[in-house]
Amino acid sequence: MDVVLITGNKNKAKYFSKYMEINIEQIDLNLEEIQSLDLKEIIAHKAKQAHEQVGRPVIVEDVALEFKTLGKLPGPFIKFFLQELTMEEICDLLKNKSRAALARCIIGYYDGKDMQLFEGELSGTISTEPRGDREFGWDKIFIPDGYEVTRSEMNDEDYKKTYLQIRRLDLLKNHINAKSKE
């Protein structure tokens, strides 16, 4: 099946291809991202836009990190928080508040007719300070439930395990396999 992952991260496309056991092309598109706390709405919009530009089945994804004490915030706006604040400042937002958090990712598949959204989530807490060596997103401040370390401090096995809990590649793989048999 000819499917395109819309991302600027070439390594992500390689990982998706390896996990899904199909060739997934990577294209970096500058998509308009609507501002919403509804991750499903954001993904559906991005998927339709991407399909319109490439004319083939597309995969898009987005993540949200919700601080329970702040409702759904920062949610999908976490990327802007990371651009404007240091990790320490983000940790300080929760000073004297609950540090409970929810990491979410939605992967969208759209072929021009069929829109499918695959959602994964991982509960945890926000650390009091950034910790770890991985320099990816908010991994230095998110401690998944059942762990005492941030995702950035995890060994490769635990990192992959939590990655696959957030990103439901298994559901996407099943869907694409079923589509290829139609």
Image (tube, helix red, strand yellow):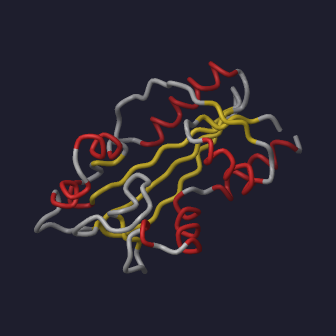
At 43% from the left and 80% from the top, the residue drawn is: 146
Above or below for 116 versus 112: below
Nearest to the observer: residue 26 or residue 49 = 26
Expressed as whole percent of the image width and height from the top left, the position of residue 48 reads 58, 26
Residue 8: quadrant of the picture: top right
Nearest to the observer: residue 7 or residue 166 = 7
Left or right: residue 89 compared with residue 123: left
Residue 87: quadrant of the picture: bottom left
Nearest to the observer: residue 170 or residue 136 = 136
Nearest to the observer: residue 164 or residue 135 = 135
Left or right: residue 120 compared with residue 64: right
Expressed as whole percent of the image width and height from the top left, the position of residue 79 reads 35, 43
At 35% from the left and 35% from the top, the residue drawn is: 36
Residue at the left extreme of this rendering:
96
Left or right: residue 119 compared with residue 15: left
Rendered-image quadrant of the C terminus: top right
Expressed as whole percent of the image width and height from the top left, the position of residue 148 reads 37, 80
At 41% from the left and 71% from the top, the residue drawn is: 144
Residue 65: quadrant of the picture: bottom left
Above or below for 13 versus 162: above
Residue at the right extreme of this rendering:
181
Left or right: residue 92 compared with residue 165: left
